Amino acid sequence: MRCALVTGASGGIGGAICDMLADKGFSLALAYNKNEQAAASLIAKYQKNGTNCIAVSADLSRDDGADRLADGLKGFSRVDTLINCAGVASFGQICDVTEEEIRRVMNVNFYSPLRLIRRLSQSMTQQGFGRIVNISSMWSLVGSSCESVYSASKAALEGLSKSLAKELGRSGITVNCVAPGLIDTEMNREIDRAAISEIVDNTPLSRMGTPSDVAKSVALLVDEDCFITGETLNVSGGFVII
């Protein structure tokens, strides 16, 4: 049986990815930070349908957050699929960004995925199979004013993914990114409506994306027969075309 760890599982995109994996018969380890209620609801739903699953709390903004999470998986099925979905945003001019904020964003968006890959790729290599999908952002592709640290953290994640695709490919492990555009999640509902309208107006498909749109893209990349590695799948409705 396939077994996946999904970070950021209690969020909109993370939850949709978990739903997709559960439907495909995966065992699931759901990592969350503070939203214990949302994680518990997912566990109850999946267990009702016969899915083997656990929830693990982890603060990935801490230097030891990823290692604590990996340690919390002991006794669970061997993970062959890792979805690094946890992420935090950061807004403001670069001259106003504090060192503390830089560390928080880089730890969650880059260093924790790196540390989890470092830990879990060892067992994937032993199995001769693994699927790693890192959730990036369209802003990693084109940059975003007043989101420089966030954009840089996601760009670093994509660079890491390309290098690891070359490093781990001979062990049967694929490493890819999905770069969502503007997705209709609770976090994005806090964005100014005028800013949302401007993005939608400049999106060829003329709508916000949904968490399901992202999950469907992830489904392609975790398939056992996937022949894609080292790529970033741009899921922005055409807002970013390179």
Image (cartoon, grey):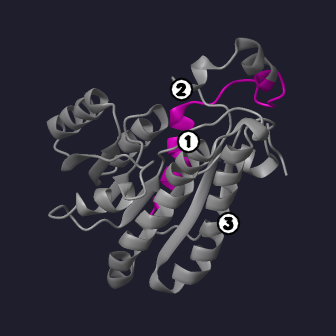
Q: Is residue 134 left or right of residue 239?
A: left
Q: How much space separates mark 1 and mark 2, taking CA atoms? A: 12 Å
Identify the residue at horizontal 81%, vertical 20% (top origin). 198
- Whole-angstrom CA distance, mark 3 to mark 2, is 26 Å
Tell me the mark number nearer the camera, choosing from 3 and 2: 3
Q: Nearer the viewer, residue 100 or 78?
A: 100
Q: Is residue 222 left or right of residue 75?
A: right
- The answer to whether 76 appears left or right of 166 in the picture is left
Visible in this render: residue 3? no
Kindly indicate the quadrant of the structure image that contains residue 97.
Answer: top right
Q: Which residue is mark 3?
A: 159
The amino acid beneath tag 3 is Gly
The residue lying furthest to the top in this view is 193
Which disc, if any, is residue 214?
1
Q: Sort mark 2 into few (<14), some (14-19) or many (20+) by Cα contacts within 10 Å.
A: some
Q: Nearer the viewer, residue 145 or 97?
A: 97
Q: Which residues are magenta?
A: 199-224
Residue 209, magenta (yes or no) = yes
What amino acid is found at the position of numbered circle 2 in the picture? Thr
Q: Is residue 177 magenta?
A: no
Residue located 60% across and 67% down the image: 161
Q: Which mark is residue 185?
A: 2
Residue 121, picture quadrant: bottom left
